[in-house]
Image (cartoon, grey):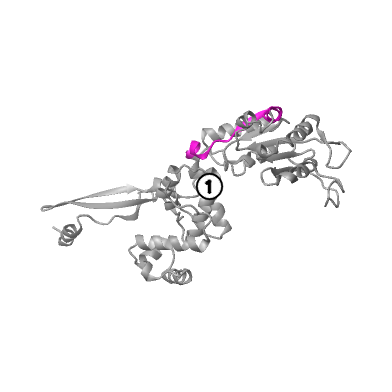
Amino acid sequence: MDEVAHEEGLRFGACTPFEKELIRKDGTRVPVMVTTAVLKLSPFLWITFVTDLRERDRVENIEEETPGAAHHFEEMIGSSPALKRVMRQVEVVAPTDATVLVLGETGTGKELIARAIHRLSPRRHLPFISLNCAAIPTGLLESELFGYERGAFTGALGQKIGRFEMAHRGTLFLDEVGDIPLDLQPKLLRALQEKSFERLGGTKTIPIDVRLVAATNRNLTQMMGEKLFRSDLYYRLKVFPIITPPLRDHAEDIPLLARHFTKKYAAKMDREIDKIPAETMKALMSWSWPGNVRELENFIERSVILSQGPTLRAPLAELRDDAPEGGASSTLEAVERDHILRVFREAGGVVSVTATRLGMPRTTLNAMMKKLGISRAEL
């Protein structure tokens, strides 16, 4: 009996798993995980498991694409039935001049839908003008939409062209249309029905040829019941409704989105990241993403900032219902500091192990600790 193996079995009961490459007869290399466990000491018996890691590496590789993935709509990326259904609706309505109302939760990509409709329409080479109605103070929204003439009000020192006029012969996208004040809604309805309008302080009727796409995350039906949104405007907007699904309803698209955003932000930050750990991807797919694709994108961007090596290091502790708010609003230094401290504690306070897990040399880690004011007493 091998005395060394016997002693190892006596002390540990099992051998530490390790990865290696096996070379097949045809010369191809297969990554495997070798795990050996001691079954009996006398007589000495052991068993070895060899696990093929090709599937794991395929899943973790950020270059991996899903066959048949439909992602030719800018960043509308995914191959799920829910997303494909939306894309088919876009392809059907885009060649027409029909008004489209995009409904869905915040962060589901409503503006991407509008841009896709414009890009697939005969107006693709003409202006695409967007306006977020919730971002403009109520008193200024009318002049933003329709413009004004010089002297229309105090401070109107010159003529202003409104968004309707800018979008002539193109597409106008009104985001958060549910935030348009009730007293302005009749003028918007009249402009859509008559295909003309007057600037504030003007008397000239200006004809317009505009394809309108509107979007909202509000319940317009409920707002009509509460007399906050005109029913005639609602039905004028809702010629062709498209509902964008929340990310929790097409979680199978998360791996594609995560890989896409990792590549996008790694390139922006000049980082080399080629792997998303399987446990990270599992955590991403398990989270409900109340902020939808926008929340996922922000989370991946934050993860890329924290990643010093070739593997994405995501702050998975944030993906808990009891996680403290402010992950996204924390300063970069605070996020880095918390992440390094957490990895340090997981590594038992050993600098070399922590540096390896963070994917950086010990000297770089020591320099970062000094910069971020991390003392040994905190470990």
Q: Is residue 363 above or below residue 304?
A: below
Residue, far right? 204
Query: Which residue is the site of mark 1?
Result: 295
Residue 6 in percent (x, y) is at 15, 59
Nearest the eye: 257 or 200: 200
The answer to whether one can see residue 120 in this image is no
Task: Report the residue at 67% width, 29% height from top.
Answer: 238
Image location of residue 289, percent across then percent down: 49, 43
Check disc 1: other Cα within 10 Å, few if <14, some if 14-19, many if 20+.
Answer: some
Task: Name the side, left or right, on which 30 lies relative to 10.
Answer: right
Q: Secondary structure at mark 1?
A: helix
Question: Who is closer to the viewer here, 50 or 193?
Answer: 193
Q: In what quadrant of the picture does the C terminus appear? A: bottom left
Residue in the picture at 86% in, 42% down: 201
Looking at the image, can residue 93 be seen? yes
Name above or below for residue 86 compared with residue 269: above
Q: Quadrant of the N terminus?
A: bottom left
Amino acid type, mark 1? Glu
Q: Is residue 84 magenta?
A: no
Residue 364, x across and y down, in percent: 45, 69
Q: Position of residue 104 (x, y in %)?
A: 58, 36
Q: Residue at x 66, y 29 (%)?
A: 240
The residue depicted at 42 percent of the width and 52 percent of the height is 317
- Front-most of residues 194 and 279: 194
Looking at the image, which is closer to me, 319 or 151? 151
Range of residues picked out in magenta: 231-251
